[in-house]
Image (cartoon, rainbow, N blue to C red):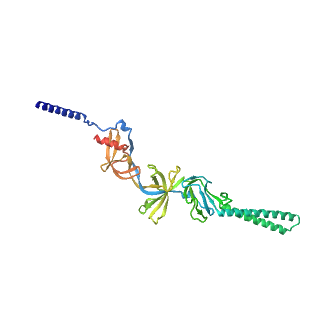
């Protein structure tokens, strides 16, 4: 029994020695010499140089998309009546001349009845004039009778022309006998406002328009500026607009109007940015984030923000001389705007640094130090 226990202890000790030897064999050997970028690492990095730049100031605002009010047509009713049919909905694309709504109107019916009566009067007075002219030339009737017939015909013509002009003003070819007239799109574009439905009764003295049509090739962005930031916005300043609908996509424009009065309700100043919208991505009433940029009269060393590495509440960059000469340098940041970081210390103008996959190289570099 004692012999068996002794053999067991011997075997256990041998196993421990073997395991220790294996572990010591697996321990990585620390590399000698400077850290160098491998061939694969060299294909993963981008190198850029620090520069002297004018410091950009940025102001972040909230805003909303609106249609360009200089490129819209608001459509009002021509005559009172009952809306029989509405053929479009909000957001529909329309072409010039397309029927938007059908109206049944007693006024239109009355206009056409008056026109029919006036046409009949013109025909009657024309026959009377022709008869009097023939009698006058034959010496049977007097010149006075001929002149009276001519005056009656002229009056009938004037009455007919007046009614015809009224019909033309109220819609002309859009109106039909029987009291029907059509609301048509005056331009091609999109229905950006719709304030009428089938069954509504409308009057020509309505203050509200029925439809608004806009081409949406250009849109406005209205943004609100708080009183403390008014000095930071001026016409001509660059503006970058982003939306929740298109993450990562920026729309670039400029401030083209700054209001001269504050909104009395929320005490903000409104500014307007005009943007091209050729792909029709921006829709009226869409919320936006607006970044206003202007250049200050100050300069500093600037580098891409992609070159920054954050660790333990400190910021570093990797300076590059060659593939085997790299250095980690702590930097002090003045500010970040967009894709630029302005540096107070840690990088000199003209120094090369890694700007892509800097964090990966930083980890490899520090692990080998």
- Figure quadrant of residue 352: top left
Q: Position of residue 269 (x, y in %)?
A: 46, 62
Q: Residue furthest right?
A: 139
128 vs 88: above or below: below
- What residue is shown at x 35% (from left), y 52% (from top)? 333
Say which of 102 and 273 sits in front. 102
- Figure quadrant of residue 79: bottom right
Q: Residue furthest bottom?
A: 144
- What residue is shown at x 44% (from left), y 60% (from top)? 225
Q: Position of residue 300 (x, y in %)?
A: 38, 52
Q: Residue furthest left?
A: 2
Say which of 327 and 39 sits in front. 39
Decide if residue 50 is in sight here. no
Q: Position of residue 363 (x, y in %)?
A: 31, 42
Specify the quadrant that holds the N terminus: top left
Q: Position of residue 17 (x, y in %)?
A: 18, 33
């Amino acid at each position: 029994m004692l012999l068996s226990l002794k053999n067991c202890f011997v075997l256990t000790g041998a196993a421990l020695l073997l395991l220790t030897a294996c572990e010591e064999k697996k321990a990585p050997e620390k590399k000698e010499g400077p850290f160098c970028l491998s061939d694969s690492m060299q294909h993963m990095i981008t190198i850029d140089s620090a520069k002297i730049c004018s410091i950009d100031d940025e102001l972040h605002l909230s805003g909303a998309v609106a249609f360009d009010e200089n490129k819209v047509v608001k459509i009002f009713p021509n005559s009172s009546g009952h809306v029989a049919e509405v053929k479009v909905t909000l957001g529909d694309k329309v072409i010039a001349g397309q029927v938007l709504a059908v109206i049944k109107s007693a006024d239109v019916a009355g206009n056409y009845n008056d026109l029919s009566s006036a046409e009949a009067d013109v025909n009657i007075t024309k026959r009377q004039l022709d008869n009097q002219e023939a009698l006058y030339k034959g010496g049977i009737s007097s010149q006075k009778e001929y002149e009276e017939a001519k005056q009656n015909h002229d009056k009938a013509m004037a009455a007919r022309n007046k009614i015809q002009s009224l019909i033309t003003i109220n819609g002309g070819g859009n109106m039909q006998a029987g009291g029907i007239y059509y609301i048509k799109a005056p331009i091609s574009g999109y229905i950006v406002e719709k304030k009428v439905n089938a069954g509504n009764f409308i009057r020509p003295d309505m203050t509200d328009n029925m439809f608004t049509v806009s081409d949406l090739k250009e849109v406005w962005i209205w943004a609100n500026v708080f009183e403390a930031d008014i000095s930071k916005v001026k016409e001509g300043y660059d503006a970058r607009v982003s939306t929740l609908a298109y993450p990562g996509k920026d729309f670039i424009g400029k401030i083209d109007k700054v209001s001269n009065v504050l909104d009395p309700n929320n005490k903000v100043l409104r500014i307007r940015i005009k943007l091209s919208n050729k792909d029709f991505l921006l829709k009226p009433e869409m919320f936006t984030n607006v970044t206003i940029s202007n250049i200050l009269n100050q300069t500093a060393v600037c580098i891409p923000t992609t070159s920054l590495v954050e660790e333990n509440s400190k910021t570093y960059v990797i300076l590059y001389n060659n593939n085997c000469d790299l250095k980690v340098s702590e930097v002090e940041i003045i500010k970040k705007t967009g894709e630029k970081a302005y540096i107070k210390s840690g990088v000199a103008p003209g120094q090369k640094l890694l700007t892509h996959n800097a964090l990966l190289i930083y980890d490899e570099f520090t692990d080998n130090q």
